[in-house]
Amino acid sequence: MPQIRYKNVSWNLPFLFINPELLDLYFHVFQNYEVENPIKKIYGQIDNPWSACFLNLKYSKKELEQYFNYIKAKNICPVLNFSCYDIPNSKLKDEICNYLLDLIENQNGEVILSSDKLFKYIKKTHPNIKCVASEIKSVFELKKGKEAKYYNELLKKFDRVILSPSYVKTTFLNDIEKYNDVSKFEVIINNNCIIDCPNEKNHQKVLCELTKSNYKKHKIFECSKNSLSLNKIIKNSTLLETEEVDNLVNNVGIKHLTFKEEYCSIPLRFFSSLIQYTYISNGNTQLLCRDVANSLFSKGVL
C-alpha cells in the first residue's frame, strides 16, 4: 500500500472545470489502494471578466449548477480562481461571475483573488466566502526586500496567502521568524518559471487584457527561459524538489500545497509528478504510477 508523505497537509489541485474523467480517475485510484485522499481542494477558472482564461470554457447557469453538484458529491472544496488584477467597476455586476459566487458560498468554497477591488466587493456581497491572496497579486505589488512586511499585511486580510514561488525558492526561509503563523501560507510546488522572471509582470498584464477573440492578434513576448541555457534554467528554476517540500512541511510548518495546471494537458506527466510529491517513494508508488498509466491509456487520455 502506498504510504502518504504528509499527514496534515491540504493539497489544492487544478481539477476544477477540466475533464471530469481525470478527477474520477484520481478518486478511483485512491479507492483501489484504500489510502487516504490528501486532496482537499480543487481550483480552476472559466471564461469571465474576472479571470484571465483562454480555455474557452463557458457554461450556462444550469450547467454550472450541475457541475458544482458533481463536485459536492466528491466531498471536496471548490476554489474559483479570479486571476485578473485590474477589474473595471462596470464588470463587478457581471451576472455569471456573481452566480459563481452564489454557488461557491452555498458549497463553503473559496476564491483566489489578485484584485483588492474584487476582494472588497466579495466581502460586501458574499461575506462568508473564504478569500485567498493569489501569487499574481505579489507580481504587481511586492517589493524586493520587503517580503515579510508585505505578507504580514496580507495575512491580516486574507484567509490564506499564496506565496511568490521566487520568494519561496530564495529568501523565505530566512524570514521565518518574522511571521507569527505560517500555517496560512500556501506554497506552489511545480511553478514553471524562473526566479525573478523579468517578464512576469508584463505577462500577467497581457493575459488580463486579452480576450479569446483578440488573443491571436497579439504577439506575446517570448518566455525568458528561451534565452537561457539548460543549466541556467535548472539553476534558476522555481520548481521545488521533494526534499525542499519536506523541509517546508516538516520543519517550517506549511500546511497548504498547490500544484499548478501546466501539466494537466499531459495527464500521465501530471499524475506521475503528483504521486512523487504526495507519497513516499517505494515499490507501491511505482505500481500506483503503472495503474494510473494503464487507466489513462484505456480511457484514451494518455
Image (cartoon, rainbow, N blue to C red):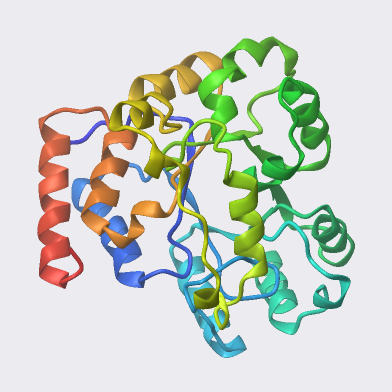
- Residue 118 pos. (x, y %): 81, 60
Quarter that holds the N terminus: top left
Above or below residue 205? Residue 66 is: below
- Residue 160 pos. (x, y %): 68, 40
The answer to which image quadrant residue 240 occupies is top left
Left or right: 74 as drawn, with respect to 146: left
- Residue 167 pos. (x, y %): 59, 27
Quick one: 283 or 91, which is closer to the camera?
Answer: 91
Residue at 37%, 32% (x, y): give it. 233
- Residue 174 pos. (x, y %): 62, 11
The answer to whether residue 82 shows anywhere in this view is no
Above or below residue 226? Residue 241 is: above
The answer to whether residue 237 shows anywhere in this view is yes
Residue at 55%, 78% (x, y): give it. 212
Left or right: 285 as drawn, with respect to 57: left
Quick one: 73 or 21, which is closer to the camera?
Answer: 21
Left or right: 37 as drawn, with respect to 57: left
Quick one: 123 or 113, which is closer to the camera?
Answer: 113
